[in-house]
Amino acid sequence: MTRAGDAYIVCDGLEDDVRVSGKKLNSAMNGDIVEIELLPSRGRRRLEGKVRRVVQRGATHFLGTLKMLRKYAVLVPDNPKIPFEIFVELADTKGAKDNEIAVVKVTKWPKRSEESPVGVVTSILGAAGGNEIEMNSILLSNGFNMDFPEEVVEESEALALEIPASEAKRRRDMRPVTTFTIDPDTAKDFDDALSIEYLDNGDIEIGVHIADVTHYVKEGTELDKEAYLRSTSVYLVDRVAPMLPERLSNELCSLRPHEDKCTFSAVFVFSKKGKIKSRWFGKTLIHSDRRFTYEEAQEGLDSGEGDFAKELRKMNEIAHVLRKQKFKNGAIAFESPEVKFELDDEGYPLGLYVKERKDAHMLIEDFMLLANREVATFIVEKQAKQAEIPFVYRVHDLPNPDKVADFVSFARLLKFDIKTDTPRQIADSYNRLAEAAEKDPALKMLQPIAIRTMAKAIYTSDNIGHYGLGFDNYSHFTSPIRRYSDVLTHRILEKNLEGTYRMKKERLEEMCQHISGQERKAMESERESIKYKMVEYMEQFIGEEFVGHVSGIIERGFFVELKDTKAEGMIPFETLDEPYDVQDGRLKAVAQRSRKEIKMGDVVKVRIVDTELSRRQIEMELIEE
């Protein structure tokens, strides 16, 4: 939806999007799934249409200012793209005062565009402004909500903590085996654990144990419906909007130390040299002996001392073998820097740092990748002997040829050659670039541009493989506490361990599309929260100078990412000495008179001119190239 109130509808099966004027939206809003009717073209270039009905609402909760009138109240949404106010009966205001910020759930949508939706207040956030309001606004504008419906919370609270003897009996008992978790120091939900056992013949058995969410979340329950609706946990800078209520995510399903837990496991037997000899999937019972933070696990890897240091080192040895094989098979080694903030008690950013990835992080990642790959391979191998078994695949398509061609030309300017005859050659060239960038800082600027040539990974029932990982078969099995895709994977896998189960492919594909859409919204929410905190942090540096590099170019100007903080701001072309033309591919802009060039990756010195928190923007000016 545009600020003017018109909308553009993206449709499967149509190459171009469809414009719908505000008068023909039939109360549809940004993010809704709608059924539309195409209108006669009348010579217009762009397809136009009208909304016949709203199939699914992208958001049902809205944040705004509550205006208390004599006989009723009105919520004025904070988001300027929402073109209506919400009518609230005084009895449904939860005791809110005039001009307080509140969250309202719409209970009745209008049939005519001139009418207002009707809603009820679900929470009151108090006076305008501040971190709490902004973070909630980011979530709600993307269709997420911190609070769960009452019936969902009631269902979760009714679940028993104890594991019945009958349930324990039907599971493989792995409680005697050395088991531990490795997670960030701030983590509260532990959805994966690793176990290790040395076998009598010298082989090593490593178990990847995943929280058995489907044991608690049954199909068709209110818990299940809400989990599917959300499809993912959302990780903002200072909070998590979980997919499952806390009773499940932090208690029942979380693989906390010194507690018996129900898990779904992928267990692998490795030779001494790290070669996989066998695999087993099934329901298990585990007992975690230790909860490691990444830092603690890394300390054990570095020093060889402390709890389970020998086991950690053996796992790391095997992880290195898995990683080497992955790159040998064509995986791409790009990594984007992850910025972390240090916040005070009020959520204000005091400092920031770029998260460092060490062996402890990659060890966990390698075993999770292994489990995800082997689960998908099991289904593919099983269906090879019979008809297709519809499954949830995590796929990653080949890079966009046009973007690759632009990138190849640009890389040549920096004397770096990209070979593009085959997809494998592109992958190998990108890996050469990653290696070369470690020695030549100028080439480091090419990496983010190379990433932009890549497709986005999605969920689908059509297995086209995962190009970026170099896997023919890949799924998501390892994070069911925070991803509904993994819940689906668990259900389908379990039924196919016992016999053969085929879900209707059309329904599964529909669910995959919904989950992919929710993932995109979650990523947008996370990016917005980082932008907000970044702008808030940079407010103190107005007038100061920084070094950065050109990170994006649009018609109005170019973006610069600062070297130290990774903050990104914009420099409008109109602030420069002469007009600039943006070239095809948006990798450079050329001055009209002097022919001076501004290229992606150029190192520049800038001054912070202004910050605007409400629009999450940092304005900069160019001092020198």
Image (tube, helix red, strand yellow):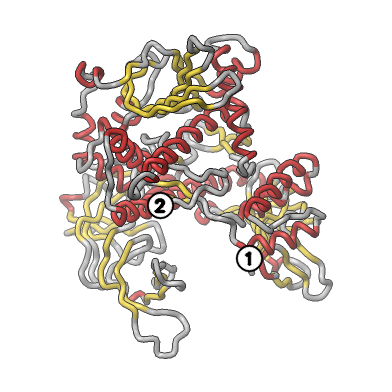
- Mark toward the start of the polypeptide (1 vs 2): 1
Residue 267: percent from left, percent from top: 43, 25
Task: Give the residue drawn at x 79%, y 53%.
Answer: 416
Tag 2 secondary structure: strand
Gap in angstroms between the C-alphas marked 1 and 2: 24 Å
Q: Which quadrant, please, contains the N terminus?
A: bottom left
Numbered badge on residue 460 = 2
Cβ–Cβ under 8 Å for marks 1 and 2: no
Q: Assign a secondary structure to mark 1.
A: helix
**x, y percentage for residue 239?**
43, 37
State left or right for residue 415 relative to residue 349.
right
The answer to which quarter of the image holds residue 212 is top left
Tell how many labels: 2
Most foreground residue, 333 or 294: 333
Classify residue 582 as left or right of residue 163: right
Residue 402 bears which disc, if any? 1
Residue type (three-letter) at the residue carrying disc 2: Thr
- Residue placed farthest to the front in the image? 385
Left or right: residue 386 compared with residue 550: left
Which disc is residue 229 wearing?
Answer: none
Relative to 108, does residue 538 appear above or below in the rendering?
A: above
**At which x and y percent is residue 3?**
44, 68
Q: Amino acid at mark 1?
A: Asp
Closest to the observer: 192 or 519?
Answer: 192
Q: In this rendering, is residue 289 above or below 65?
A: above
Instruction: Please state if 547 lies on the left or on the right of 166 as rendered.
Output: right
